[in-house]
Amino acid sequence: MTVLTRWRRAVAHEIRLLRGALHRRLYASRRDEAAIVEAFHRLYFDARAFNMTWRNTRWLGCPVLKCPLDLWLYQEILHDVRPDLVIETGTAFGGSALFLGSMCDVLGSGRIVSIDTEARPGLPTHPRVEYLVGSSVSGDVLGQVRARAAAASTVMVILDSDHSMAHVLAELTAYAPLVTPGSFLIVEDTNLNGHPVEPDHGPGPMEAVLAFLPTHPEFKPDPDKEKFFLSFNPKGFLRREA
């Protein structure tokens, strides 16, 4: 392929992107767009009541209680950041830990530590995944996690346990120092309490993030991680800049 051919293809690609952007701005108002996205978000989330969508999603046969678009973002982040250690609070059925371990297999590096208060039988086994039992903010668990983080050069954290504001804020305070610059601290389910689902939930992950950020300027929400419109973690993909 000649340089001129590559240049023409690059220009044609940019023209297509610009055409799409102009169409959105000229023929679809941002208010209408947001209303459509929020309506679909609620539809997708609430379909769990019929054992559909995220309540009926599996990775290699194991239930994984996530939005698949967020899982796709996780693999992009893992590829870009290449963490030596991923810390996950909230194991549930182990599907997300298995997914993360599988992605680390593809990349050829990385380990997962997944924490839950319940020792659930039948969790999936994977050579890159380790399960810890206990509260994510207990001294014993934090001591074990900090020891593993101290031996890793790049650390990423995903918070997905108790979704009360107080607990998430305690997790943010405890786990933020473990995240290495350039990596991510991800707060899951910031869509709760009317953002836009479960308006009666009460203060939760989103409110914890909003309370955390003003005193931690090294962390900033990454808007690129909402490029698929639907995410269960709006404003929850926090990149550490320093």
Image: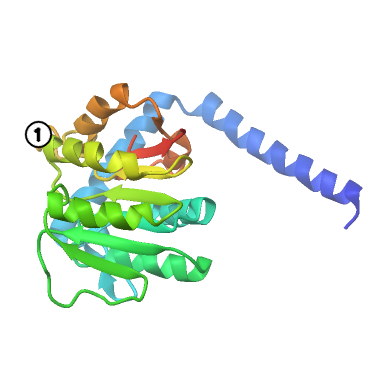
Could you tell me if residue 191 is visible in this image? no
Q: Which of 94 and 147 is in front in this view?
A: 147
- Give percent across and percent down for residue 90: 20, 56
Residue labelled with disc 1: 202
Q: Nearer the viewer, residue 75 or 176?
A: 176
Name the residue rendered at 18%, 49% in the picture.
46
Mark 1: few/some/many CA within 10 Å (<14, 14-19, 20+): some
- Name the element at disc 1: loop
Image quarter where the N terminus lies is bottom right
- Give percent across and percent down for residue 89: 23, 53
Name the residue rendered at 44%, 44% in the picture.
183
Looking at the image, residue 124 sits to the left or right of residue 239; the answer is left
Q: In this view, does 125 lie above or below 58?
A: below
Looking at the image, residue 173 sits to the left or right of residue 9; the answer is left
Q: How is the image coloured?
A: rainbow
Looking at the image, residue 169 sits to the left or right of residue 38; the answer is left
Q: In this view, does 204 lie above or below 67?
A: above
Q: Residue furthest top?
A: 214
Q: In which quarter of the image is residue 117?
A: bottom left
Q: In which quarter of the image is residue 128?
A: bottom left
- Give percent across and percent down for residue 169: 19, 35
Name the residue rendered at 42%, 38% in the picture.
239
Looking at the image, residue 68 sits to the left or right of residue 90; the answer is right
The amino acid type found where label 1 is placed reads: Gly
Could you tell me if residue 70 is visible in this image? yes
Q: Is residue 35 above or below residue 3?
A: above
Q: Which of 105 and 236 is in front in this view?
A: 105
